[in-house]
Amino acid sequence: MKKLLSLLVLALPLLTFSQKKPVRNPPPKPVAPKQTVVNAATNNAGGYKIEITAKPYKNQWIYLAYYFGGIKGLQDSAMVNNESKAIFKSNKPLPQGIYIVASPEKSILFEMLVGEKQNFQVISDAANLNDIQYLNSEENKTFGEYSHFIAPRAQKGEEAKKALAQDSLKQLPNRAQLENTITQNFKEIEDYRDQVINKDETSLLAVIFKSMKETQLPENLKHPVTRQDTINQYRFLKDHYWDNIDLMDGRLVRTPILEGKLKQYLNNYVSPEADSIIYEFNWMIALGRNDDEMFKYLIGYFVDNYVQPKIMGQDKVFLHVYERFIAGDNPKVNWLNEKQKEAIQKRAYMLMANQIGAKAWDLNMVDANNNARTLYNEKNDFTIVLFWDIHCGTCKAEIPVLDSFYQATWKQNKVGIYSVMINEDAIKEWPDYIAKNGKDWTHVHQTKALKEAEEKAGKPSFRQLYDIRSTPTIFLLDKDKNILTKNITLNDLNNVLQEKIKQLKK
């Protein structure tokens, strides 16, 4: 399934960067897409006018691209004339942030800052991109000076890290020197950034540098000895993680930094349970709502990452965001068109009916002899609900494995399998197959008559109620038909069941 971030945050086309792909025929004139939001932070009554000298290109299109968290989008395009000059301009200002100037092949030429002053010139030569000149932009001059300063130090630091990594098990005679090189280079770079921050902490470059700062541990927590020391270290790092990042400053959205910081925080400092993530989202969005760009980004990030999460049950986070900000006749997001709203709403409805801990919906099916077999009439301590297709290769591979688990331990521990074959077009092949595979299970299907009666009554289908988007799809229910797990591997399912069985026997 496609991720929904593009539905939420992108009104502009993505820019695909490639060194090899040829450029398709360009549009007849430069593209100047509309800006969705203009905040106080991006207010520039004169719009933007950025003059680019891009040697050696002539009579070709170059592109202006922006960051939006972890993606890159196309902002504008301009034709380079015979003198290698092009102009990106519009009567509306750009949201402040880091922007990319890309070649006709859509490879990155260089990055630049777009702050409050959006009328400046850049002189570049693809043969020597280390020597870019910025005119009428002090912030970009500082950015360029920083790039020159950091390049040799970053290279030395990386070389030292590689040397240490390659000989990690040996006692190198120059190990102390290599470690000192890394420490010294890091300190010099940090000191340089601090000078920029201290000069004007409200500038775009200062905000970027502040957001790149790592949390410094106090001396008493740098070398944990006991378990409590480790806990205290973790708590300190979590409590101070956001000290240098302002979630009310939308300029950070237009940089490649914020997304990495957010991802690291959620992965390393937040428990994977949905309620823990929802707690973090709530305080973040309380701050982010003060800036339109940040608000849009946070909504998009949490929808995109939790609409189809890697960890079971985290789709509850997506539903929380949907219900608070997207659902209803007057959603708090204002950038979605009707088609986008419909797609997100449909996904939400598919998930609402099958959340972990909720009671599973009853299923009214018939077996191979056309006898009614409803899910709620299955009397087991645990019930596995399996949705499969007789033409599904994965199903054919996994059903014997599922049956081996069933015969080995599940059957004698009051575990039942309610197996739903979903392909009515192949129903003639079904009886012979189930006579040989999983023959002790409850095998059912939904007849066309049952389906038509369901549609006539306006009831949701089992595909919607159980979010059937692929086969096999597996749910584990308890005695009262509450959902314990969904969409996990067979080995994980067996592990969960063995633990649940042990708990019942205590």
Image (cartoon, helix red, strand yellow):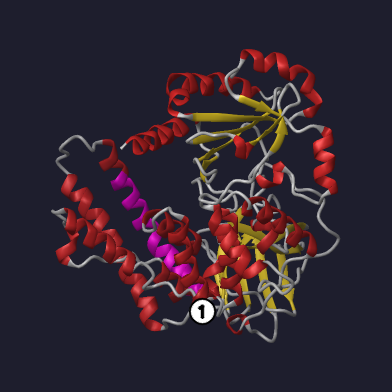
- The secondary structure making up most of the magenta span is helix
- Give yes or no for residue 150 being in the magenta stretch: yes
Is 187 on the left or on the right of 13, as rendered?
left
- Judge by depth and name the residue closer to the eye, 460 or 196: 460
Quarter placement of the N terminus: top right
- Give yes or no for residue 247 being in the magenta stretch: no
Is 471 on the left or on the right of 490, as rendered?
right
- In percent of width and height, residue 459 lies at 77, 50
- Judge by depth and name the residue closer to the eye, 298 or 184: 298
- In percent of width and height, residue 237 lies at 30, 64
Q: How many marks?
A: 1
- For the magenta stretch, what is the residue range? 140-161
- In percent of width and height, residue 205 lies at 47, 74
Q: Is residue 63 above or below residue 334?
A: above
Query: Image point 73% across, 66% down: which residue?
Result: 336
Please name the residue that numbered disc 1 is placed on. Answer: 138
Query: Image point 72% across, 34% down: which residue?
Result: 365
